Amino acid sequence: MKYLITAAAGAMLLAAPAMAQQGATGQGNFIGADGEQIGTATLTGTPTGVLIEISLEALPPDSWVAFHVHETGSCDPETDHESAGAHFNPTDVEHGYLTETGPHAGDMPNQFVNADGVLEAQVFNGAVTLDEGDAGIMGRALMIHAGPDDYTSQPSGDAGDRLACAVIE
């Protein structure tokens, strides 16, 4: 009986980070290159990752754009959002879904912008958590790039300029 109690307690400790983030929420406001708010993000922690819902406008119509988590929670349009740093990569692997050791935790699939320049999407990222732990993205930034990610080029997929940035709060 003592073994069963110990095993159950150990399982609960291993699940604690996932249980802690389940139901946790975050949000962010996307700031465009001109410094104006052009969209929002709502994030929800789950037992196996983070569900990210985004809604943006004023993006290049009829185009694919890259969507990433960046390492630093700073969205300064004066620096073309370079203040957000590189992709979030806590495990130090290659960028991209099509590389041998990738993807980064911050890599997510390209998104399509409709003819009106509006992007609405729900993206699930199973490599991150909605907290401040090793895989945590709370306090980091979401980024929309001008072009699609090619899923192979290092270090960031040759995705082009940074069009919109949101600090995750």
Image (spheres, helix red, strand yellow):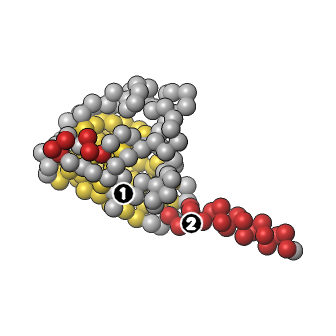
Report helix, strand or loop for mark 1.
Answer: loop
Q: First in sequence: mark 1 or mark 2? A: 2
Q: Is residue 89 left or right of residue 6?
A: left
Report helix, strand or loop for mark 2.
Answer: helix
Residue reaching furthest to the right: 1
Give the class, few, some or many, for how many residues have Cα within 10 Å of label 2's Cα (few <14, many ≥20).
some
- Is residue 53 at least partly visible in the picture? no
Residue 62 higher or lower than 30, as above or below: above
For image coordinates 40% across by 30% down, the residue present is: 155
Q: Which residue is under mark 1?
A: 139
For image coordinates 84% across by 69% down, the residue present is: 3
- Is residue 2 at least partly visible in the picture? yes
Residue 14 higher or lower than 152, as above or below: below
Give the class, few, some or many, for how many residues have Cα within 10 Å of label 1's Cα (few <14, many ≥20).
some
**Quarter containing the C terminus:** bottom left
Q: Is residue 101 left or right of residue 31?
A: right
* Dot 1 and dot 2 residues touching (CB under 8 Å): no
Q: Which residue is under mark 2?
A: 19
Q: Quadrant of residue 112?
A: top left
What amino acid type should be assigned to the residue bearing mark 1?
A: Gly
Give the CA separation, mark 1 to mark 2. 20 Å
For image coordinates 51% across by 35% down, the residue present is: 93
Residue 10 higher or lower than 50, as above or below: below
**Quarter containing the N terminus:** bottom right
Percent x, y of residue 142: 33, 48
For image coordinates 46% across by 61% down, the residue present is: 131
Percent x, y of residue 42: 34, 59
Single out the mark in the foreground, 1 or 2. Answer: 1
The front one of 74 and 51 is 74
What amino acid type should be assigned to the residue bearing mark 2?
A: Met
Percent x, y of residue 67: 35, 41
**What is the count of numbered marks?**
2
